[in-house]
Image (cartoon, coloured by chain):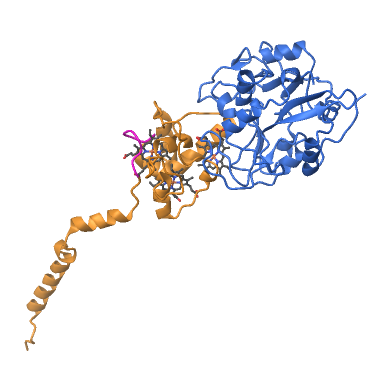
Chain colours: A blue, B orange
Amino acid sequence: MTRRMEFHVPQHEKRGFEAAGVDRRDLLRGLVAGAGLTLASGVTLYAVGGVAEARAPGDPVSPEVRWGMLIDVNKCPDGCKACVTACSKENGWAETGSSLTDAQWIRKVEVTDPRTKTSRALPVMCQHCAEPPCVDVCPTGASFKRDDGIVLVDKHTCIGCRYCMMACPYNARSFIHEPLSDQKPHAPRGKGTVESCTLCVHRVDEGRSPACVEACHADGGGAMLFGDLNDPDSEISKRIAEYATQQIRGDLGTDPGVHYQNL
Amino acid sequence: MPGPFSRAGVLAALIALLLACAWPGAAHADPAQSAQTARALVPSPQKGKGDACVADTDFMRRYHMTVLNHQRDDTVHNGIRTKQFSLKECIACHAVQGEDARPVSIESPKHFCRTCHDYAAVKIDCFECHASRPESNKAAQLPTGHGDGAVSALSRYLKGKGQ
């Protein structure tokens, strides 16, 4: 029996509740639906063992690929923030301690089971949904899904209305309130637009994996796996086929590209 | 009855006047110097690194905004990462050293993209998001091998000479 809880509480309340370490595990897990995902069977050209093989720089992304991630919560140590630190360094954002306006590319969410008191911490970022609500509501078409499944904001067309932030069930997007300078050349960000995890699209396009995944293997628990969900032979697809995995709020039908194991 | 000026006299005087006006040396004392003054009034952006830009210099002067916008959509929506018209590459190659031996940012009027824009009163917002100078720890590298086919095709199209 799944307990229904409102995940979509107003931002300020939610952050408070997170800080108080209140039961987020149930919140998340109760809402994880049976992870019935439909993987389109596809020919794959680019993924070998879950690691991307560089596409020629002049070739467009292919819909035959769907990038995704599998996070094994058991391997994600409490207190480890290797993925968060790596993301912040790679993309040039910083936590300012002002939780209402801080960038939300990736964060560790702590969840506790109220009965057993066991707690888990898991990284949550843009879930790169197959049916992204942020894309549905965007009035300018700035919020879009790339052919290879990566959900992005085209900041050139973003007018900063923030409908997408409201529509996102994962609270994965944030707005830039202050003027910035000296951004990373590969990660432009600026005041007045919405941003979120890009799955390190600039790295993926070069055949590398996202910075968080790399750091998780180097300095963390090795919990994160990146790969092509459409390729039945990729490491990630094999693991998803073999083990029970879950998508956060799979009941919404957004079909996230980020899967969790042992949640 | 002949007046004080004969017809021939007037004509001669007129011709002399016209010649005087047309004579270059008369109006402008030094033509070379005047051209110099005119040149100082137009912007003179510093040359990028290397010998040539990513396309014909004339083409780049006129159409850099078009190629940048095109590249922008190609990259963001289709993941196309060719270097030729990448803004990141323009910034890397057109970096101008400042007094602190670091490339100047868009704050400085010496920034490559500001030289002409300030003069022509063009205002762009690109650098609210895009880095206006290369990352400090990484030396700017020259991109290699820009194909010319795409440029000439685009150039032909933009100049209306395509079919």
Q: Residue A11: which quarter of the image?
A: top right
Comparing A97 with A255, the one in front is A97
Residue A176: image location, x then y, percent:
64, 44
Q: Quadrant of the C terminus of chain A?
A: top right
Residue that extends furthest to the right in the rendered view of this protein = A1
Which segment did they paint magenta?
B46-54
Asked if one can make out residue A140 in the rendered structure from this viewpoint, the answer is yes
For the residue pair A212 and A157, the one nearer the viewer reads as A212
Residue at horizontal 33 percent and vertical 48 percent from the top: B44
Task: Judge left or right: residue A150 versus residue A72.
Answer: left
Q: Quadrant of residue A103?
A: top right
**Going 65% across and 41% down the picture, which residue do you hit?**
A96
- The residue lying furthest to the bottom in this view is B1
Please say whether residue B123 is one of the residues in the magenta stretch: no
| Viewer-nearest residue: A22 or A178 | A22
The x and y percentages for residue B159 are: 41, 42
Q: Is residue A248 above or below residue B29?
A: above
Residue A253 visible (yes or no): no
Name the residue rendered at 31%, 34% in the picture.
B51
